[in-house]
Image (tube, rainbow, N blue to C red):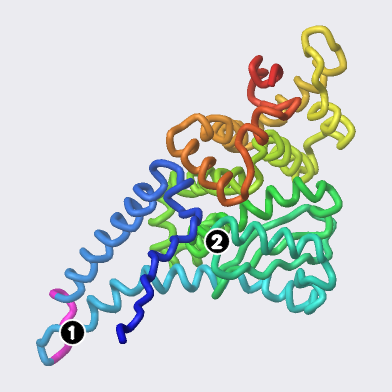
Amino acid sequence: MARKTRKRGKKERKLELTVKDFIFPGETASYWTGVAGVAIIFAWLAVMGFFLIKPASGKHLWYIPLEVMAYPILAVIIGNMLAARPRMKELKRAGRQAKVMGNNYPELHRTLVRDAQLLGLKKAPDVYVVRDDKPIVFSIPGAKGSVIASTGLLAALTPQEFEVLLAHELAHIRCKHVRVDLAMTFIRSANPAVKIILLPVLLLMFFARAWPELIEFTADRGSLLVLLRPALLNSALVKFAVVADPNAGITMEELQAFLDSSGDIETDAAQMERHFKVGQFMSTQPHLRERIEQITEFPQTDQGKAALEKMAEIQGVSLAEVFVSKAKRADLVEEVQEDREG
């Protein structure tokens, strides 16, 4: 009797967003330029130390080059520990109830799990909501990363606007930006003694000085792919900048009226005043206008078109429904006629 065999079909590969789908051009090159610059300097120091430092026996100390070359990595780790220490204390004071879970923040928890899956994260990072009137949101490194947001931020933004910022932080975690970026952020405001001790981080920031800006562009792209709503992303960035700056001089009513307005600013005096006021504020925010421009341009690039098509397929939606059927697509850089007609 013949033995039946069963043909095994090829297992379908799961469609998943990758970092290559949305990474901003030049980000990787900028990072490795910084790493190479630091490596060259410390390689030279390692060689000099090997040949110049000799004990009484006259033999070269083979471990000196290893210690010198390991120092840059150790400096980044120390910078992370120093930067994260006050934040970890804040989480400890907040207690377990600050962690976003299904029983205390059900909607936010569902959003977190969904967005993490869309970005290709194997495990959703921990998210904590701490009691603070200041609107803050940031990430800290760890096994799966953590995002910390304040009650002040949740109160100032709509759930959809907060999701924009959450997806932005998740994109940073997905792209493994957090550890080095946190060390760079810490070294900027560190005292001179700490800057000398953590010299490799300072050198990395010098050689890769464009990298902190480029990773924001990348994270914005990741957020755009998750939400598929450029107008929401643009307005959320501006709104967050306004609420985070106590000297902005713009009320939420003025900002919302500006964002909601569909009138012609040339004939609407009130809207013209708001447009000028918000425009003046935006010009004072580092790289905010550039970020909005990049969000607008990304869907028009080959990389952006391919990424959007992939994400639309993953989410089971039609790009036509996302981009064409909307009555208004806000562009905070310039009024684009085809967007108003869409």
Q: Quadrant of the C terminus?
A: top right
> In the rendered structure, which amino acid carries the disc numbered 1?
Leu
Q: Give the range drawn in magenta.
A: 51-56
The residue closer to the viewer here, 8 or 22, is 8
**Contact? badges 2 and 1 (CB < 8 Å):** no
Q: Where is residue 70 in the image (x, y as percent from the top left)?
A: 33, 74
Q: Does the magenta stretch include residue 36?
A: no
Name the residue at 50% across, 29% down.
Answer: 300
Main secondary-structure element of the magenta-colored stretch = loop
Q: Mark 2 points at which residue?
A: 173
Residue under label 1, please give it: 61
- In the image, what residue occupies the spot 43% across and 57% down? 202
Q: Please indicate whether residue 186 sits to the left or right of residue 18 in the image.
A: right
The image quarter in which residue 249 lies:
top right
Mark nearer the N terminus (2 vs 1): 1
Q: Which residue lies furthest to the left in this view?
A: 58
Q: Is residue 54 magenta?
A: yes
Residue 103: which disc? Answer: none
Residue extending furthest top? 267
**Relative horizontal placement of residue 133, taking residue 144 as reference (left or right):** right
Residue 306 placement, left or right of 159:
left
- Work out whether residue 135 or residue 234 is closer to the camera in this orientation and state it: 234
